[in-house]
Image (cartoon, rainbow, N blue to C red):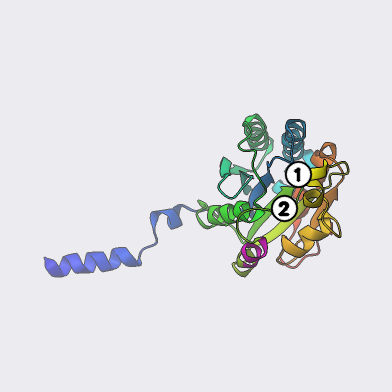
Amino acid sequence: MRWLLMVSLLVASLLPSPRARAAEPVDLLLTLVTDVSRSVDDAEFALEKEGYRIAFTSGEVIEAIRSGPLGAIAVTYIEFASGYEVRTVVDWTVIRDEPSAQAFAQKLRDAPRSFWGRTAIGAGMEHALKALETAPFEAQRRVIDVCGDGTNNNGPDVELVRDRAVESGVVVNGLAIVNENPVSWTFAHVQPPGGLPNWYREHVIGGPGSFVIEIQDFRSFGAAMTRKLISEIAMTDGASPLFR
């Protein structure tokens, strides 16, 4: 009996875990990591959320998803402010058609704002990495999509987290929202030397084909996110992105 028990335990250890067996394949694992720090006021936050809704319900985005080998992507939405203010607002959701896209977009848009603190981009990216590692889906391509209007001023070092992500095969892209009329106490934060898009290029993005999209105000968020999603969904490893 003892011998049989040992054999059973050995066989069980060699079998894939229930999670591994249940992992659903998709074309892309996409984490949306969004800055909700105090430099983003409530009006801008509302425009940001409406922009996500516009992007995910766009016919072009849905067509890009359908055109993939599996015709499906998995997406999660994360908000961050300071290093201890990071939360998954919308958990992993598979999008493969218009109804699933609309359901995800509406859930994202209806969720209340999470935080108001400082700006810990690295903490948001760390949270995204953990989400990718524990996702109940599997994909050849994994992307962290960071959106924000300022530099990192709290939490872990962004470049270290970025490098760890790239080493694990994750691509990090950015959407830099340029604040052209900042208040005095946020000027250096939202308009660093060389400009925010260049700061994102140097400190945030990484991996094959990584890119930054620049917009001048939150009203442009929906159109920019639509272009960004199409680029991320349609890309294959090593392909040139649509935007730099």
Q: Residue at x 82, y 43 (%)?
A: 184
Neighbor class of circle 1 (other Cα within 10 Å; few <14, some 14-19, many 20+) is many
Q: Name the amino acid, label 1.
A: Val
Q: Is residue 157 visible?
A: yes
Residue 74: image location, x then y, percent: 61, 48
Q: Is residue 226 visible from the viewing direction of this image?
A: no
| 171 horizontally vs 1: left or right | right
Q: Position of residue 216 (x, y in %)?
A: 87, 44
Mark 2 and mark 1 lie on one chain; the one further toward the N terminus is 1
In the image, is residue 37 above or below residue 5? Answer: above
The residue under the point 67% across, 32% down is 109
Task: Name which residue lies at 75% across and 37% down.
Answer: 48
Q: Is residue 162 magenta?
A: yes
Looking at the rendering, the stretch of residues picked out in magenta corresponds to 158-163
Which quadrant: the C terminus? Answer: bottom right
* Mark 2 residue type: Ile
Crowd around label 2: few <14 · some 14–19 · many ≥20 (10 Å): many
Residue shown at 62% from the left, 51% from the top: 124
Task: Name the residue that disc number 1 marks.
Answer: 61
Instruction: Provide the residue designation for mark 2.
Output: 233
Q: CA distance from mark 2 to mark 1?
A: 8 Å
Of helix, strand and loop, which one carries label 2? helix
Which SS does the magenta portion mostly show? Answer: helix
| Rendered location of residue 126, percent (x, y) | 58, 56
Res 194 → quadrant? bottom right
